[in-house]
Every structure is written in C-alpha cells, then in structure tokens.
Amino acid sequence: MVQHTRPLWRRLQYRLDYLVSRSTTALIGWLTLVCLSVVVPASVVLVWADHQPPATFSGQLTAVWVSVGKTLKIGGAVGSPLYVLASILLALIALLFVSTLVSLITTGINQRIMELRLGHSTVLEARHTVVLGWSDQIFPVTAELVTANCNQPRAVVAVLAPKDKVEMEEEIDARIPDTGTTTIVCRSGCTTDPAVLARVSPQTAKAVLVLPPGADDGDTQVVKTLLALNAVAAEPGDAIVVAAVQHAHNRVTAQLAAGPRGRVFAIDDIVARLLVQTARQPGLSLVYQELLDFEGVEFYTVAAPTLTGCTFGEALLSFTTSTVVGLLRENATVALNPDPATTIASSDQIVVIAEDDGTAVVADAASCIDEEAIATAVPRTPTTERLLLLGWNRRAPLIVEQLATYVRAGTTLDIVALGDNATMPSAYDATVAPQHLDVTMHCADTTDPRVLTRLNVPSYDSVIVIGEAGCTPTGAPVLTQVTEADDRTLVTLLHLRSIEETTRQKISLTTEMTDDRNRLLAPVREGADFIVSGRLISLLMTQISENPSLADLFGELFNAEGSGLYLKPAGDYVHPGSKTTFATVVASARRRHECAVGYRLRSQAATSPTYGVRINPDKRQRVRFTADDWVIVLAGN
C-alpha cells in the first residue's frame, strides 16, 4: 500500500482546526498558552536588551513580570503575593467587563446593520409611491416613475417584495442607473402580512401599485395583498391603489378587495384585445406606446371655464396645440368621445392629449378649417380574410374570441402550435365557440422553418405571433418560462424575416412579448407592431398612480363597449393629395362623431423614432395626405 505523507503545514492546520472546534474552555486554555509562549520570551528579550538592565536576577524577573503584565493588560503590580494576586484578579475582572461591553456593542451594531441590509426598517415618508411585489414589471414601472418625477425635487419610490434588499437594489441599479431626483428605497418582506406592509408606510403614500407575481397563483397573491393593505390602517388614506391580475374572471374579486379607491386591470383581457386590434390596424401599438409613456404627449384633465355652455364639438377646435378627447364630469366619471352636441357644464373638466398640462391653452382653431378639402367616406363592403396565429398560451382563447367579434363570417383562422396533453384540449375548446371563424388547428413547431414554408405565410392577410407555453419543464421558475417563450418567439420571427427576404413580400405581423429587452433583439423590419404585455400594464399603472382621474379613462379605452383608438384611411376625411391643416381633419372627424388625435404617414412608416406616427399635431400645421396614409381617431365600436 502506498503511504501518503502530508506536508507539515497541512498537519498543523488540521490540528489547529481540531483545537478550535472543541469547547470554549479548551480554546481559551490553548489561546492562553500560545499567548504566554510568545509574550514571556519577548519580555525576556526586552529586559535583556535594555540599555540599563537590572543588575540582579530577581530584578530581572521583576522587570519581565512588569512587561508581561502591561502587555496582557493585568497591571504587572509588584509587591506582596496577596497584593499581586488581588491586582491580577481586578485586572481580569476589568478585562472581562470591558471585553463583554465591547462585544455587546459590536453585536448590537452588527445586528442593526444586518436589519438595515435585510430591509426591515420602516420608511418614514409621505406622498411617496409604494410598489408591492417583484417581477419583470418592476423595471418599467420604476423607470416610468423616475421620468414622471423628474420635475420634483425629492420624490421617493418604496419597493416591498419577498426578496433580498441588496439584490433588489443591485438589479434596479443595473437596469436604471440614473434615477434623477427620485430615491428608490427597497424593503424585504411578505406583501400579504399587514405588519410587514407597514414598513413602507402605505397609509401616507399618494399611490400604491400591486404588481402581479406572474406565477400560476399570482392572482391569489394580488388579492391577499389588497386585503392586507386594508388591514394596515384603521382608516383608509387618500392613496389610490392600482393592481393587475392575469385572468379576467379574478378582476371582480380583486376589485372588491381593493376597495372604492382601487383600480384593477385584467392583463390577459387587455393584451388579447390590443393584439387583435393591432393585427387589424398596423401601427396601433406605436400609438399606444406614445400615449402611455411619460415621454412625449400624455392624457391630462384641465379646467376651461371659458368653454362653459359650449358644446363638445366646439371644444374640439378650441385648442390649437392640444387635442380634446373627452370630459371629466363632476362625479369623477370620464366620458370619452361624447356626442358633439353635449353641453359642457361649469363643473366639467376637459380631457386632452398634450405635451404638458400647462400647454393646454384655449385658442380657437376653427378659422383654420378648409371646407373644400373635407371628403366624404365611401362605405366599404367587409371582406373575408385569412388569418394565422402562431403559438399558444393562456391568452390564445381570448384572442380567438376577440377575432370572432371583428371579422366577417367566412374568415379563416389557422392556428399552429406545439401539441401536447395540456395545450391541445384547451385549443380545441377555444375553436368551438367562434361562429364567424373557420378555425383549423395545426400541431407543429413554429420554430421549424419547414413548417412556416409549407404554410405560405405571405399569403395571409394578418399574422399574430404569441409566446409558446408548455415548452419548459413543469415547476420551472416563472422567469425561466418567460425567457423560454420569448426565445422561441425570436426564433420564429427570424424565420419569418427570412421568408420576407426570400419572397420579397411583406408580412402583416403583430407580435406578443413579455420582456421589453427581447423586443430590441427581434429580427423584424423597423416600425413593426409589438405588444409587450409587461411594459403595457406597467405604463397603465404608473399613469394612473400619477393621475388618478385617468383610471376611468383607461377603463373605457380598454373596454369592449367603450370608445377606442383606430387607424382609418386618410381619404375618408380629406381628399388625397390636398395639403390641408389638421384642424380640417378634426372638423371632418367631428361630423362622424369621432375625435381625430393624429395621423400616420406611410412614407415614413419605416423611419425611426416615430415611424410616421404623429399624435397631437398643431391644428394649424398643413399636411399633404395620400390615399395610403391613416388618420388616428377615437371612435365608438
């Protein structure tokens, strides 16, 4: 047998580890012996090397004792044995007391530092914004709040989530390096515990945002968090509570838990509706992005006492640099695109689209109307379409249902998705209900280029690509599932781009993604339509947190029965080829009981950063519209 000889330093290290791992008493004894083995010889050397060492041996021993006593902080007193023992005892008691005191102080400071690092202290702020929960939406929410607070000298955003405080701060710093005048404070804890919720002082906040976790039981977590918010304070404050749930059937429950000042959105319902509307109106996603973020134009409510007694139709042309879209009534309800004959009361406020609420100044634009340029829309006969849906997830049944409400009978819909025991039954159930759609299921992999080639994708009138669910193992983290779905979408888009280049035919494409960072990687042409679900809901929540009166506005805007945004042919409003003012377009839309809010020029549809979209143009501005351009209007269904 081969004998292995361990190095000396390894054997010494092993013996030291063994000694340290024994009892405290043994460790103190060994440390004392080691200390004396070093201090005593060193003291002897000091006495011997002194320039005037004691002459006698007893004097040398006394000098050595004094040196040892001073080094070990036990005095080194000289005298009778009883006197020496008493001095040593007192020195040891003092040393024990001081060491214990220092240890207690150090332990207390360390505990306090750990509490602060763990995020267990209370946020003592007022009129701040509270964000509860942690998901990918935390980054667009925080970024938009930073942008919204750029004109405030000291704004605070408090984040509470069941995640390590330091990790949250590091991730936010990595994604949002410049927070401007906004201070972001993170606290760690369970959002469903009222005692923990008190750490971020929601009762003194101006707004509380409850983010959906994204897991299968995420809606339950949101409802419990809303109930915990009600239990934090005996009396509800004036903070508006904005929450989002995934499934539409959980919205009513969450709304009851949120209370009268709460606003709850159903993510799946809104995303499905926008996907369908954008698929039928290319460019609509760009319009919503422009209106919902805090850069550029936004929705505002302004008082206009000079318009009291006027009709809403007259108000449409009473602002040159702002766009009127509705009225905010005295009971805090919003009427989007009311009848032009509606009379404006003294208590009403005007809902406008403007760069800032200070720019919404009354200035008549009726004199800029060119009556000769106004055209009459020619009725169009609806035609049947061929539609393609690539991918399948929990929102797919809602997409199919929405498509059925817009298309003409006889329209065909081909669905291509991976077939497994979980996907196909739900897909089949969804294809039974629509009566206007002729639905055909194809069990295939959308990331396989051979599958897309056989489909002849350019022959379809519209193509919708959504994230494929069910590809990750059961029980995988939510972030892993989201990343996998977006990754498959990117691969599908890459093959579609290749088909466009090969056939030299453009594909009318609308894509759903979850992470906004993946949208930047998408291999599609400039100006393509994307619905990023996480970012969309984040923008909605932050807009309402800064302006609570917008809650009813967005509720109607995303309601199936309310007024919505549409891109309609410019030739329906003005004669193609004529160069006319936008006030003329507004006047033409007014005759159709619509509010014109902007336009999109086809010649600039591939040019960043606006891709031809212009929201809230100056009504005095002259534009030459062609038959291929669009007017963006707010109109009823």
Image: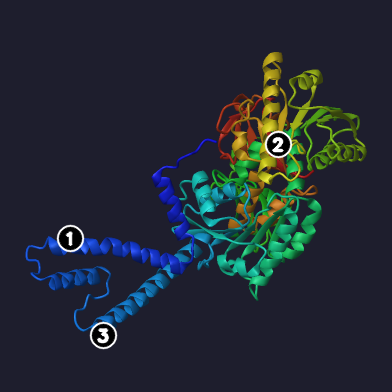
On the image, numbered disc 1 is attached to which residue?
Answer: 45
Q: Mark 3, mark 2: which one is toward the viewer?
A: 3
SS assignment at label 3: helix
Q: Is residue 340 above or below residue 206?
A: above
Residue 303 visible at all: no
Q: Which residue is mark 2?
A: 485
Q: Secondary structure at mark 1?
A: helix
Q: Amino acid at mark 1?
A: Val
Q: Earlier in the sequence, mark 1 or mark 3?
A: 1
Q: Which mark is residue 74?
A: none
Q: Which residue is mark 3?
A: 82
In which quadrant of the rendered image does the C terminus lie?
top right
- Residue 229 at x, y = what percent? 66, 67
Q: CA distance from mark 1 to mark 2?
A: 75 Å
| Name of the residue lying farthest toward the front | 1
Foreground: disc 1 or disc 2: 1
Please say if 635 is above or below 93.
Answer: above
- Left or right: 339 as drawn, with respect to 351: right
Q: Is residue 49 left or right of residue 533?
A: left
Whole-number angstrom distance, CA of label 1 to CA of label 3: 28 Å
- Is residue 632 or residue 277 the one in the foreground? 277
